[in-house]
Image: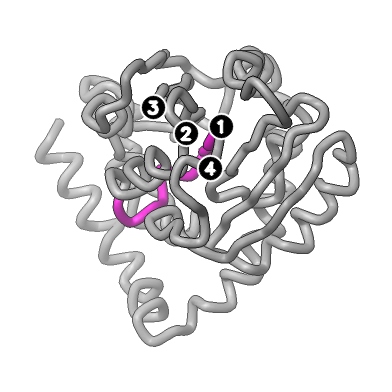
Amino acid sequence: MTLFMNACALLVNVLTLPLHIAEVIGLMSFYKRVFPLIVYKFTFSYNDKMNDNKRELFRNLDKFFPPKGSLRILELGCGSGANFEHYPTGCRISCIDPNPHFQKYLEKSMAKNDHLVYDSFIVASGENLKAVEDNSMDVVVCTLVLCSVQDTQKVLQEAKRVLRPGGAFFFLEHVVSEPSSWIYFFQHVLQPFWYYFGDGCETTRATWKHLEAAGFSDLQLRHIQAPLFFMIKPHIVGYAVK
């Protein structure tokens, strides 16, 4: 199947060559403005289908409240604020996303979730959190983000840096499927097209390996099959403690 998969992937690469050229010469920049709207619309369907998984995951936030004061959460790749409804009342939220065009959709989510306190929206990548002080966060949240970052290991090290000792990195990410599956086949064949449709998203990442190698003191990780489009059915969910 490997030879057939490689041949199919080569064909898709050829078909997406115009998109690659458009990206190189800057013609794809307009999609950065459109993509936040697509994500905002997608969020409603994703949250509906993943509500139980998110509720179970974020129930663990209670374990990481500081002895005094509010729970401080940094959300990496915050997008349109899809997780806000799951956070406990009174949490202080700092948001980071490399795409400034998410801000108006983020503000809509903020208005709907007024049980939270919003500190800042910072335009930056997950690899560069220099605007956030060392040991300043109780929790870092990262959902559907590690699929598109440039350097997964750097993002995880930055997350560890800003977390206080005993703080936690919460994640919910789609990942590559088992190599023997048809999902794995299509993830690799259609990846060139998916990359442009998903603004840099990759379906072929074994993100759990990076989490296992990141040096957290405790890693609670589960593999699940999400009730979603087959390309992004395989997910990992859990949290890692600094």
**Distance between the alpha carbons at the discs numbered 3 and 2:** 7 Å
Q: Disc 2 designates what residue?
A: 164
Determine whether label 3 and label 2 are within 8 Å by CB.
yes
Callout 3, which amino acid? Lys
Across and down, in percent, residue 142 comes to 51, 38
Determine whether label 2 and label 1 are within 8 Å by CB.
yes
Does residue 143 show up magenta in the picture? yes
Would you say residue 117 is visible in this rendering?
yes
> Which badge, 2 or 1, comes first in the chain's sequence?
1
| Image disc number at residue 242 | 3
Callout 2, which amino acid? Arg
Does residue 228 show up magenta in the picture? no
* Residue range highlighted in magenta: 138-151
> Which badge, 1 or 3, comes first in the chain's sequence?
1
Across and down, in percent, residue 107 comes to 81, 56
Determine whether label 2 and label 4 are within 8 Å by CB.
yes
| Image disc number at residue 138 | 1
- Residue visible at 65% across and 15% down in the picture: 62
Residue closest to the far bottom = 25
